[in-house]
Image (cartoon, helix red, strand yellow):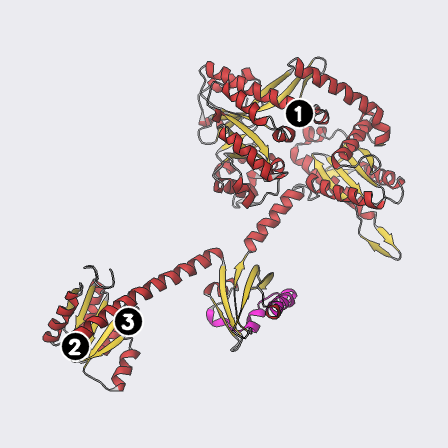
Amino acid sequence: MNDEHPTRQAIALIVDDDPTMRMLARQVLEQIGLEVEEAGDGQEAVRLFKQVRPAIVLLDVLMPVMDGFEACHAIRHLPGGSHTPILIMTGLDDIESIEKAYEVGATDFIAKPWQILILSHRVRYMLRTGRVLEALRESQAGLARAQQLAHLGSWTWTLRTNQFTVSDEVVRILGLSSDQFDRTPEAYLRNVHPDDQELVRQSLEEALALRRDYEVDYRVIRPDGEERIVTERGAPACDEQGRVVTVTGTIQDITVRRNAEAQMFLSTFYDRLTNLPNRVLFEERLRQALESAQQTGETGAVLMLNLDHFRRINETMGLMAGDEVLHAVADRLQDCVRKDDVRTGPTHHPSPYTLARLVADTFSILMPHLRTTRDAAKMARRLLAAIQQPFSIAQKDITLSASIGITLFPSNAADVPTLLQQADAALQSAKAKGGTRFVYFAQALSANQTERLALEADLRRAIQQNEFVLHYQPQVDVRRWAIRGVEAFLRWRHPTRGLLGPGQFLSCAEEAGLTVAIGEWVIGAACRQQKAWHEAGLPPVRVAVNLSPAHFRHQGLVETISLAVQDMGRSSEHLELEVTESMIMRDLDHSLKVLKHLKALGVRIALDDFGTGFTSLRELRLLPMDAVKIDASFIQEAGAMEGSPGFTAALITLAHSLKCRAIAEGVETQAQLEALQRAGCEEVQGFLYSPPRTAEETTQLLTKKPDPQARNRPAA
């Protein structure tokens, strides 16, 4: 309805016991485009209001049965009646009657006898004002809903009156009701955690003194004792003399976000089984220690410890018992590290050493400040002795032993990867000598270096003589139990050592600069296999290939992919390239350019090891991903997700919010599969369906029809 000509849907209700007055009013209202309903008394007016919900009511005062004051009061208490414009038409011109009209809820009044032109303008004005107020109410309601959804409240502090006005959401964040909140800054501060009150007070005082905006995070305590974390932002406003007169701001409840960040931090930097620092955190602390040692001239050490014959524990007692052993070993190693406190004068300081679980049954200890190089040997002896003490696991006493490799820095190496390789080389030398001992890197160097040189020569020959082969592990639709894709895994058919997995030669390939050449072979072989399946008439599936960090950074990558997909026989979308968060975040700008070029070729991109990095949601949204692969370390918990979303379920939800498929790796049990199905995961990959198989075996799998019932049977 426009201002001059209301639409026919707008209804006016005229209430007057005088038919002549109703007729005259009808003529005026119909001329401005209103439909008209009439009532002869207040009681009939209330009944009609319920039926027609008019846009405006013209109400006489002196009427039989129910007068205008009573009718106005009744209408205001009807659904939809609280904001409807009501114009009182009265011949009473005394002040008392006018005041009573406003008391019962009248919007305005007009004296009888009224002039046609004045009534017409008065009605137009009231309708226009009513629409503006309705729009304002809807806007305020929408803002309140938005604030509630965002847990964001607003406030204003007027310094002259010390009045502290807050939105309803601020009161909700504090866990209070409106009548419980005393609207002064002092009252609000009483809800702040005692340890944070001074921080809040100082932030506000500095903002007032410097006349600048501020932001501060702190805790509030609700009446039931629950703590919430909030972010407060404020902005002072000054008068013409430059004096602060008001401060306006917002308060947002960020408790859920902070908890998620803390959980993400723990999952990124700490081992989930032992709660020790993981490899990521260990490498960062080692990098810092190495920089410090290079500046100060101090000597540090890295000790790498691996349990001897730990596989037997898993094979004879089961994986759960194996995890229990690792947890007990971690506790015992931690006790050894903590005993080595540092004495400075008469006081003790906590041990500066870092104990981490790198992978499986391999642990590492960082000793950044050695008083003498013999300190590393003393620590190694202490660790070996502690491991040899019996463990009580599953009501059985078991005895373990360990081997340790030691390297010193900065004398042996000036970078983290080399130091870890040296410690690992020394560890392997200790194991080769029978275990239950420690070996310094210098002692292990000659034999290990000779072996590495021989392996490097074999790798160069393998590339030339095509000794590599690909095995494929299916990626299965959880609903139809049908193969949607396969991941290619590299194997080496060594002439004398047999079939080797990548863990046995890739580190050597990286050191020798051969990963790009090997990666190009893998991409070509995967595309050739796709062509063979296409020519055999098999249904199309994706083939996923892992890109190494060196290959991803290589300037010829896009050209390699382009040439490979041209000869594939199927559209390029059937090739999926897997990249990790760490590879991308090493140089985000460059990575985005590379990914953009790859997407232009039509290939799919999958983010591998999803959840193990520390990429922000903002950065993830920039990545042109088609799928995310949830790391197998999280799937181990998937069977326990019943009744709780869990971190794995949160990763799946995050993947969907990024418009990506979720592929779970390492699915081995029916319980894990069912939990992943409940969480909305589209595809799974793991031994529950099939281990990695040869191309011939995979071809046989692709010829089989999907069998959803097979989900309940173990893989052959």
Cα–Cα span, label 2 and label 1: 94 Å
Q: Label 2 sits on what residue type? A: Gln
Residue 275 magenta-highlighted: no
Name the main secondary structure of what is drawn in magenta: helix
Query: Is 464 placed above or below 50 here?
Result: above
Q: CA distance from mark 2 to mark 3?
A: 27 Å
Quadrant in the picture for residue 69: bottom left
Q: Residues within 10 Å of mark 3 (few under 14, many from 20)?
A: some
Q: Quadrant of the C terminus?
A: top right
Residue 21 visible in image: yes
Of all residues, the one furthest to the left in this rendering is: 20
Decide: few, some or many residues near mark 2? Use Cα within 10 Å; few <14, some 14-19, many ≥20.
Answer: few
Q: Is residue 453 above or below residue 162?
A: above
Q: Secondary structure at mark 2?
A: loop
Nearer-N-terminus badge (2/3):
3
Q: Which residues are magenta?
A: 178-207
Q: Which mark is residue 115?
A: 2
Q: Is residue 692 above or below residue 409?
A: above
Q: Is residue 315 left or right of residue 382?
A: left
Pointer 3: what residue? 76
- Residue 620 versus residue 190: which sits nearer the camera? 620
Dot 3 and dot 1 residues touching (CB under 8 Å): no
Q: Residue 315, how many percent across, how many down? A: 68, 28
> Could you tell me if residue 693 is visible in this image?
no
